[in-house]
Image (cartoon, rainbow, N blue to C red):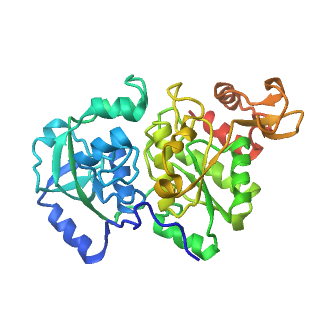
């Protein structure tokens, strides 16, 4: 049984272990140091484990410019969002091409070493409107880019095995491990669901529809940096575990986390999430309403339409499962979409996010047609603690 090939054809591995790791640790003690932002630290991990294949390090200028304008790397491989290292200007000015630089996380722990092959101006006016389709600073992705430095440092990275236990270590499977698990289970087709929220009944419907078409389902929540008002990853993981234990076929479902920071780049991020899952061994990817969106910056189904720009088998290689907005219909007594239900919005159970939060804060479960009671109870406990 053969699994889908990684993006670019080969799974990258930039993790250094054993004696080689110890050698790098000793070398790092005498190198210039650079402290990564939380997002850059997550990107470093994604590169190192092969989730960002074919990237082997932070992007150089040719890749950066073509990704911004054409959604392709310099060699033509599809890639929609820059993966760059942009330190503060005073730090960047001390770094030169040819340097080896120690990379630390915000708490000062050594993560790895970067071999600097390029230093170039960070063209934010090229990146922001192309990637985010807006230049408004209130967009969270735009705000982060504006706060980054004005120089990008590029080059391959070598990441040292962490000396600490990372968050959700039992579920933090790199692409090589998920591929091993799929092969062991005999899954040649796998659907993945990306989420940064708890799974409600409509999400459950989408994932189970996808599972009807494939051998297995990967629930793959993002546990990297998100907006401050998003529900924290620890709470969400309790919801996923409870839901999978009670309402999914364990032989056909897997839960693993992805250490990626959200960009809130809507359509481009939907494309990035798809290519990442391809590296994890996924063949089918669910793209629903306003995937990776924020506010009103993107059209409801822009994240689905972006795939029409590409030769999907050649450029993408993953089957995109395009779902419409779904909700529980009181007359149909089921989760439905406009494709399947003739009834109007007055028959749908779809409380607003604000209304749901108010109910949770008050200790009230949202309607069972919206959220499973076990999940609601976890969210009530969280809502009343903040």
Hey, which quadrant is residue 350 in on the image?
top right
In screen coordinates, is 218 left or right of 342?
left
Image quadrant occupied by the C terminus: top right
- Vertical order, 186 against 378 (above or below): below
Name the outermost residue toward the front. 311
At a point 80% along the width and 36% down the height, the residue shown is 328
Residue 60 image position (x, y, % from top left): 23, 49
Q: Residue at x 82, y 25 (%)?
A: 344
Residue 342 vertical placement versus 281 (above, below): above
**Residue 147 visible:** no
Residue 219, position as x, y percentages in the image: 61, 55
Percent x, y of residue 56: 30, 60
Residue at the image point whose x is 74% and y is 43% from the top:
201
**Is residue 228 shown to the viewer in this render?**
yes
Q: Is residue 96 left or right of residue 350?
A: left
Closer to us: 79 or 47:
79
Q: Is residue 157 left or right of residue 260?
A: left
Res. 131 image quadrant? top left
Between 386 and 46, the residue placed more toward the observer is 46
Which quadrant is the N terminus positioned in?
bottom right
């Amino acid at each position: 049984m053969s699994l889908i090939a990684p993006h670019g054809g080969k799974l990258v591995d930039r993790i250094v272990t054993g004696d080689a790791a110890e050698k790098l640790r000793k070398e790092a003690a005498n190198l210039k140091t650079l402290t990564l932002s939380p997002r850059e630290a997550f990107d470093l991990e994604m590169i190192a484990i092969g989730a960002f294949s074919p990237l082997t390090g932070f992007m150089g200028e040719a890749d950066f410019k073509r990704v911004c304008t054409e959604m392709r790397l310099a060699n033509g491989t599809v890639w929609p969002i820059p993966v760059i290292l942009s330190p503060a200007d005073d730090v960047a000015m001390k770094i030169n091409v040819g340097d080896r630089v120690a990379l630390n996380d915000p708490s000062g722990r050594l993560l790895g070493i970067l071999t600097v092959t390029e230093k170039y101006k960070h063209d934010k006016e090229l990146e922001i409107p192309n990637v985010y389709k807006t230049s408004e600073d209130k967009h969270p992705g735009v705000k982060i880019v504006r706060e980054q430095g004005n120089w990008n440092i590029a080059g391959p990275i070598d990441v040292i095995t962490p000396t600490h236990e990372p968050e959700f270590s039992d579920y933090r499977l790199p692409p090589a491990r998920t591929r091993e698990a799929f092969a062991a289970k005999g899954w040649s087709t796998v659907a993945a669901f990306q989420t940064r929220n708890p799974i409600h009944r409509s999400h459950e419907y989408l994932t189970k529809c996808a599972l009807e078409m494939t051998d297995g389902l990967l629930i793959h929540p993002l546990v990297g940096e998100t907006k401050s008002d998003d529900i924290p990853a620890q709470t969400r993981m309790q919801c996923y575990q409870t839901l999978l234990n009670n309402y999914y076929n364990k032989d056909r479902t897997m839960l693993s986390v992805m250490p990626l920071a959200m960009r809130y780049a809507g359509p481009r991020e939907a494309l990035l999430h798809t290519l990442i899952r391809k590296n994890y061994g996924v063949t089918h990817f669910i793209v629903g309403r306003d995937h990776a969106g924020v506010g009103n910056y993107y059209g409801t189904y822009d994240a689905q339409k972006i795939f029409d720009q590409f030769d999907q088998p050649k450029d993408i290689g993953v089957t995109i499962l395009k779902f419409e907005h779904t909700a529980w219909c009181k007359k149909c007594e089921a989760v439905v979409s406009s494709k399947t239900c003739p009834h109007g919005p007055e028959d749908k159970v779809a409380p607003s996010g604000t209304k749901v939060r108010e109910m949770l804060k008050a200790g009230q479960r949202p309607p069972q047609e919206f959220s499973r009671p076990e999940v609601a109870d976890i969210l009530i406990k969280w809502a009343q603690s903040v």
